[in-house]
Image (tube, rainbow, N blue to C red):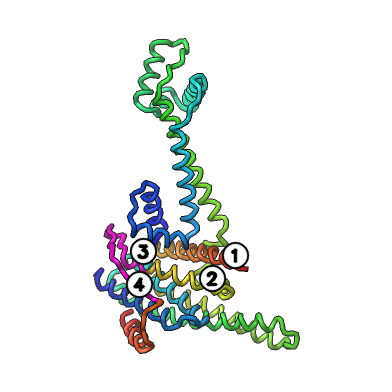
Amino acid sequence: MKCEQAQKLISDRLDGKLGWWGRKRLDRHLTACEVCRDYVLAQEIIQREALKTEEVDYPPEWWRQFEQVLQEKLIQSAPDEEAISVLPAGISADIKEDKNNNKKGRSWTFRPHVLQAASLLVVVAATLFLIIYIGRSKNEELPLPLILSYEDSYFNLSQLLAEDEEAASDLARSLEEDILQETIFFESEGEFLDIDYNYETENSSAQPEDLQVENINFEEGL
Amino acid sequence: MRKSRLIYLVIILLLASFSEVYGQGHPARRDRNVRENMFVLRTLRMTQALDLTEAQTAAIFPELNRAEKEKAQLQADLAREIRELRQLINNEKVEDREFEDRVAKILDLREKIKRRESEFEKFLLTQLTSAQKARYIIFDIDFNRGMMERMGRAGLAGKENK
C-alpha cells in the first residue's frame, strides 16, 4: 500500500469510518512504515488539541486582550481592506461598521466567532508545523538520496541486508505487498478494485517445474 | 492495450511469488528475492509513470529483462567478492597480490554494472518521447529515494537487533 493511501485510511480511522478490512490493511502497512506511524501520532496529537479548544475557558478580559492584539497584527500586516477581508464575513462586517461609526479608535466588540476563527488558525498552524517538521526530519536522515543510481542504491541496500536476515525478509515481504497494491490499484482509472486477493506465499505448493514454466513465460512475455 | 499490459504484470507477479516459495531459507536466494521483487516493483511503477504504448512496451521490455539478468548476476558476483574480501582482511597470512587481484576484480565488476546500467538507460531514452524522458528522470530519482528510505528503515531494524 502506498503511504498516501494509508494516510487516507488513517484519517478515516480517526473519524471512526474505517471498516474491518481497511483496518487490517492499515495495520499491516503501519507495521512496516515508520513514516506513517509518525503520521498517525501527529494526527492523534492534532485531534486531541483540536478537541481541547472546545474546553478552553479563559476569562472575558483575556479574550478582549487577545482580540485587540489580533486586530492590531492584522491591520499592521496588511492594508485595511485586506486585513478585514481575511476574517470571516460576519467579523469583517463588524469591523467595517465599527470603523465607520467611530473613527477615534474604539475597538470592536467581542463575538464568539472570533474565538472560533482564532482556534481554527491555531489548529491549522499546528498541523502545518507538524507536517513540515516531520517531513524535514525524515529527509535529513536520508543518505545522498538524489545522486545515487538504481544499482548503487541496490548495492548499498544489499550490503546492509547481508548482515540482517530479518530485515531482508521484512523488505522482501513489504516489496511483495507493494507489488500486489500496484496490480490492483489503477490510479489512472481512479478506481480501487477491492478484490479479496489471497496472496499466499508461505503455504503455496509451487514446485520447481512450475517455476521453470513461469520462467519461460516470463522471458517470452517480456 | 491496458489489458495486455496487465497480463505482463501478472506474469511478473507470479514469477516473483513462485520464486519466493522456491528459495525460502537460502541466504543467496533471499537476496535474489529482494532483487527480483525490486525489479518487478520498479517495472510496474515505471510502466505507470511513463504510460508506455504497446509498441514501446514490446521494444523496451525484452531489453529491460536482458539488462536486469546481466546486472543481477554482476551484483551477485560483486556481493560474493566483497563477502570474501571481508574474510580475507581478517586473515594475516594473505599476500598483497591476493588483495590486489580481489580489489581489481571488485573494481571491474562495479565498472561493468555501471556500464550496463548506462547502456540500458541510453537505449531506453531512444525509445521515449520528450515528455516520457522527463518523467523517467523524475521517476528514477523518486524510486531511488524510496529505496534509500527502505534502507534507512532496514538499518534501524538491524541496530535494534544488535
Reply above or below: A51 against A17.
Answer: above
Q: Are marks 2 and 4 in contact (CB under 8 Å)?
A: no
Q: Is residue B74 magenta?
A: no
Q: Secondary structure at mark 2?
A: helix
Q: In front: B155, or A205? A: A205
Q: Nearer the viewer, mark 2 or mark 3?
A: 2
Q: Disc 4 vs disc 1: Cβ atoms closer than 8 Å?
A: no
Which label was assigned to residue B49? 3
Task: Give the class, few, some or many, for how many residues have Cα within 10 Å of label 4's Cα (few <14, many ≥20).
Answer: few
Q: Chain of mark 2?
A: A
Residue A200, quarter of the rendered image? bottom left
In magenta, the rendered stretch is A180-201
Q: Percent position (x, y) of residue B22?
A: 42, 83
Identify the disc placed on residue A157. Answer: 2
* Local secondary structure at mark 4: loop
Q: Are marks 2 and 1 on the same chain?
A: no
Do circles 3 and 4 both sit on a common chain?
Answer: no
The chain that hosts pointer 1 is: B
Residue at mark 1: B160
| Amino acid type at mark 3 | Ala
Q: Is residue A183 above or below residue A207?
A: above
Q: Nearer the viewer, residue A81 or B147?
A: B147
Task: Identify which residue is drawn at 37% across, 87% down.
Answer: A207
- Give the position of the C terminus of chain B as an image quadrant: bottom right
